[in-house]
Amino acid sequence: MKYEPVIGLEVHVQLDTKTKLFCGCSTAFGARANSQICPVCIGLPGVLPVLNKEAVNLSIKTGLSLECTIAPFSKFDRKNYFYPDLPKAYQVSQFDLPVNLNGKLEIQVDGKSKVIGITRAHLEEDAGKLNHDETGTGDSGVDYNRGGIPLLEIVSEPDMRSPEEAYAYLKALKAILEYIAVSDCNMEQGSLRCDANISLRPEGQEKFGTRAEIKNLNSFRNVQKAIYYEMDRQAKMLDAGERVVQETRLYDAVSGKTRSMRSKEEANDYRYFPEPDLVPLVIDSAWSDSIKATLPELPQAKKARFVKEFELPEYDAGVLTTEIPLANYFEECVKEGAKPKVVSNWVLSELLRKLNDNNESIETCKIKPKMICEMLNLIDKGTISGKIAKTVFKEMFESGGSPEKIVQEKGLVQIADTGEIDQIIEQVLSDNTKSVEDFRGGKKNAFGFLVGQVMKASRGKANPQMVNQILGEKLK
């Protein structure tokens, strides 16, 4: 039987505040274990939490960027469960009255757009972290530094129908979060974590199947792989007449499989009730409007502007606007006078490849926008060819030297002297009489071979247009 997957994602975003959600402890990453804790965040008797206003501001900012309704009245609740990383035996979260409701996010997969609904985006405090000894002693410790750090949990509607859509959703969401600077989204440090809910239903059926939740996925690729595995696991169970159990599972990136962790809790298992130590949160229109005024141009709007203003293809504009530094780099190149499409070609084909190969970011790149424009001017003036430009570009990337200096020092000036090119061609024709005869006998591909030999003899310096013209005249 053919099945359709139904996928929803819960993304936990660590908000970029200097202090925790309900106390003044630092949120800096990498500190010595249990060095950033206080009576409030470890829940000692008699303490009173105080809400971090900046965390609320960042929550509202995210909600506005995701087209959510900002609730004028919201509250915090206690989510009760016992686990060693939760010293209070409850987590302060938001249950029935969250800050953000009913948003949406547009994604693109295979050139097609789709809108994914966002159920809610609510504030909550993070738990601590268990550290297990891997030397075989069996000892475990808990670091409470992370406990109390402000999180925004963004819950999607079950609108995704493929692992690719889930991947696209996460990329689009991460881009927005980085554009509005509410989080560094560093998945290695736990600033962005994802839980995936997956169920299958027979194609054409409207009723949802039984879902499994995969917890704590730490990369977009792992989200995609885990969903594929879970789809296959559930399909085999259904085909065998077995019942899929609602449960929480973990994904093992080494084996590429999910395994059962525990039965899936329902809301009533957590015994939610209003947090008695925090007053309700009232957000008036003046507060949300003041935050709305600070929003930057968001990725979708920037992409649409790049297509219209710079006449770029949708694909180019989409890649260039995935990150603010990359978009700013491109626009700076255009301001320096470079043609938008030409810059886009070099950035997408050469610059991004070298950055990826060398594990570098656009911010640390030695090639500055002005240098790109200087190199393109050398091509336009005929000083260097497009092929030579790639050699110059490589040297620019490695040394940070100016293109003109590199061309002069390495003797890369293009040969544009008719007499010199004529001599090189004569020698090539003399050395390749068989190819000359083949061309005159109707084998047109022999012409390309001869052009290649001329370029090789000139060490790639001969002007390609002049080579083609002069060689064509001689072969007539």
Image (cartoon, helix red, strand yellow):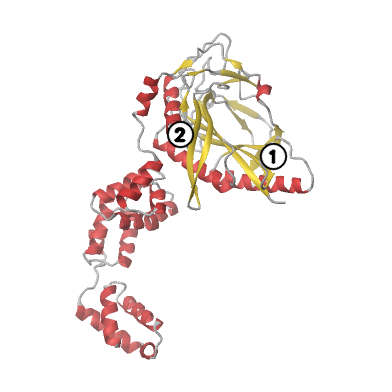
Quarter of the image where the C terminus is located: bottom left
Three-letter amino acid code at the position of disc 2:
Leu
Q: Amino acid at mark 1?
A: Gly
The secondary element bearing badge 1 is classed as loop
Is residue 203 left or right of 22 when viewed as pictured?
right
How far apart marks 1 and 2 lie (CA) works out to: 28 Å
Residue 8: x and y, percent?
Answer: 59, 38
Measured as percent of width and height from the top left, residue 293 is found at: 34, 28
Q: Residues within 10 Å of mark 2 (few under 14, many from 20)?
A: many
**Is 338 located above or below residue 384 in the figure?**
above
Disc number placed over residue 209 in the picture, else none: 1
Identify the residue under disc 2: 66
Can residue 256 be seen from the camera position used here? Answer: no
Residue under the image location 31 percent in, 89 percent down: 430
In the foreground, 169 or 25: 169
Of callouts 1 and 2, the N-terminal one: 2
Q: Residue at x 26, y 79 (%)?
A: 469
Q: Image point 34% across, 59% down: which residue?
A: 394
Q: Which residue is outermost to the right?
A: 241
* Front residue (pair 119, 358): 119
The answer to whether residue 78 is seen in the rendering is yes
Instruction: Tell me: residue 123, above or below residue 386.
Output: above
